[in-house]
Image (cartoon, rainbow, N blue to C red):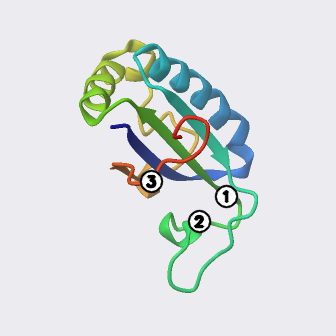
Amino acid sequence: MPYVDGFVVPVPRANVEAYRQVAETAGAVWMEHGALQYWECVGDDVPPGKVTSFPLAVQLKDDEVACFSWIVYASRAERDRINAAVMADPRIAGMGPDTMPFDGKRMIFGGFSPIVQLGASGG
């Protein structure tokens, strides 16, 4: 059964290109270690909510954009193995909160077990 990690981060608009570059490197590392898919998306239709929303969840500021990302793995066990390998990889080990082009304290993330899967890879 596939497993998915999901992330939402607030990225200053001035740092979107730097974020893309970091994400490109990180994505290559995750894929090399066995991830099935790696997606990074920049919000362009992410309305603020009154009770809940992506902007509220990450305390989005006026000069920031919400970015939504996910990584697909073959299983939870594979995710745990791959993430351990990624965290030990020197290309990632140097990426800490002080070097990221966004405020990592406002990132939201979690792991998810799919319950419906449709489309080209899901049936």
Disc ID at residue 50: none
Q: Nearer the viewer, residue 123 or 98?
A: 123
User: Of helix, strand and loop, which one carries label 2?
Assistant: loop
User: Of helix, strand and loop, which one carries label 1?
Assistant: strand
**Residue at the bottom extreme, as displayed:** 50
Give the residue pinned by disc 3.
116
Pointers 1 and 2 in contact (C-beta within 8 Å): yes
What percent of the width, then of the height, locates residue 10?
57, 55
Q: Is residue 30 above or below residue 13?
A: above
User: Of helix, strand and loop, which one carries label 3?
Assistant: loop
Pointers 3 and 2 in contact (C-beta within 8 Å): no
Few, some or many C-alpha atoms within 10 Å of disc 2 (few <14, some 14-19, many ≥20)? some
- Number of dots carrying numbers: 3
Query: Is 110 situated left or right of 123 in this image?
Result: left
Going by the numbered disc 2, the residue's amino acid type is Leu
Give the residue pinned by disc 1.
64
The CA distance from mark 1 to mark 2 is: 6 Å
Q: Which comes before the other along the chain, label 3 or label 1?
A: 1
The CA distance from mark 3 to mark 2 is: 30 Å
